Image (cartoon, helix red, strand yellow):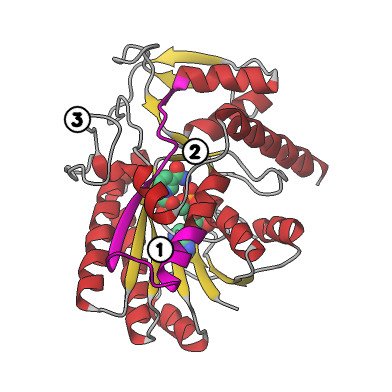
Amino acid sequence: MKTILVTGGTGYIGSHTTVELLKQGYRVLIIDNLVNSNKETLKGIEKITGLRPEFFEFDLCDQEKVNSFFENEKLDAVIHFAAYKAVGESVDKPLEYYRNNLVPLLNILEAMKKHDVGNLVFSSSCTVYGEPDTLPVTEDFPIKKANSPYGNTKQISEEIIEDTTRACKNIKAIALRYFNPIGAHESALIGEMPIGPPNCLIPYVTQTAIGVRECLSVYGDDYNTPDGTCIRDYLHVVDLAEAHIKAVERMIDNKSAKNFEYFNLGTGKGVSVKEVIDTFEKVTGEKLNYKIVDRREGDIEKVYADPSLAEKELGWKTKRSLDDMLKSAWEWERKYREKHEES
Ligand SMILES: NC(=O)c1ccc[n+]([C@@H]2O[C@H](COP(=O)([O-])OP(=O)(O)OC[C@H]3O[C@@H](n4cnc5c(N)ncnc54)[C@H](O)[C@@H]3O)[C@@H](O)[C@H]2O)c1
């Protein structure tokens, strides 16, 4: 049985990936310090799969702890999700972001080198492309100056990984550049539940619909898009989770074309904020209280992926629709609130 370390495994994407790994017969070890997640997620994972991943609660900035973890476990691959992820917050707290998003990566790569662990999947982001000149975005687009410290941590991380794989021939890595993951597992037992006010559109939508937030702000309807609102490439988090298995398999089966590879993960279809709201209202029957406000600084007008390289090389493409994404996000929000009202 192959053993995979999932850092940030109680978080949003990490928990969905853990479920898919367990379903495929991998042994999963999670490291998370719960800075943006909850231990309860482990129960959800266990209910879905019948298996409980082994959980290690500590901060990956602690090099000694990372090292002794690697000393005690024999790993076949690492999937590194753990990071801070709020673009706006990173502008106000750059040092926290640089420390938390870079130090764990250095600790992990050093431990991989020292303990001869060969395969790393890294959570990157479409933010590395900034505001693209043309669409859809392919992997050979130029990496422009990042427009936030968060985006910069992803660019720097990719460079650190590339340099490391060049120098240490026994380390292979795949960076997955996610577009906009949304939705939840169909069981509604795990999903996205940010601590504090959400930074992303969908939790804001579901929290407004359920009454936790009063009103959803749509930042600008005067962009150069068909309905004036920003366009993104939303993909289902379970589709995204499945891509991680493909990436792990590619490296374990020695199918990588190069020691460091990167792939866009998206549907290839741009969807506007207004379309998200309309679709949400259609699939849930809920009326959403929203208002148009001024544009938000730093927002990109439109971005969507060309995901054909991931299809060709990883044999991966998205299967789930926008309806599925929004329905599952809503089911998760409802079930979560019901459960927490009871307790
Ligand atoms: N969600 C998105 O829209 C999106 C898009 C592109 C890229 N990403 C990247 O994907 C990864 C996962 O994102 P997510 O949405 O699941 O975020 P999340 O916040 O839900 O999960 C991250 C997890 O990492 C943990 N963590 C953070 N710092 C840690 C540390 N120092 N030590 C141990 N644990 C730590 C948190 O407690 C959390 O459980 C991140 O690297 C993020 O930048 C996310």
Residue shown at 60% from the left, 17% from the top: 288
Segment tinted magenta in the rendering:
245-273
In which quadrant is the N terminus drawn?
Answer: bottom right
- Look at label 3 and name its amino acid: Asp
Q: Looking at numbered disc 2 in the image, what kind of residue is underneath it?
A: Leu
2 horizontally vs 227: left or right: right
Position of residue 51 in the picture relative to residue 184 (left or right): right
Vertical placement of 118 versus 218: above or below? below
Q: Compared to 55, does 130 lie above or below?
A: above
Find numbered disc 2 in the image and state the secondary structure of the residue it sits on.
strand
Neighbours of disc 1 within 10 Å: few (<14), some (14-19), many (20+):
many
Q: Quadrant of residue 252?
A: bottom left
Residue under pointer 3: 133
Question: Which of pointers 1 and 3 lies earlier in the amino acid sequence?
Answer: 1
Q: Where is residue 40, by image quadrant?
A: bottom right
x, y percentage for residue 87?
35, 41
Which label was assigned to residue 121?
1
Rendering coords of residue 246 (x, y %): 48, 59
Percent of width and height locating residue 328: 65, 36
Mark 1, secondary structure of its residue: strand
Nearer to the camera, 248 or 201? 248
Q: Which residue is mark 2?
A: 235
Q: Residue at x 59, y 53 (%)?
A: 16
The residues tagged by marks 1 and 3 sit, at their Cα atoms, a distance apart of 28 Å
Q: Of helix, strand and loop, which one carries label 3?
A: loop
Lower position in the chain sequence, tag 3 or tag 2: 3
Q: Nearer the viewer, residue 39 or 20?
A: 20
Q: Amino acid at mark 1?
A: Val
The CA distance from mark 1 to mark 2 is 19 Å
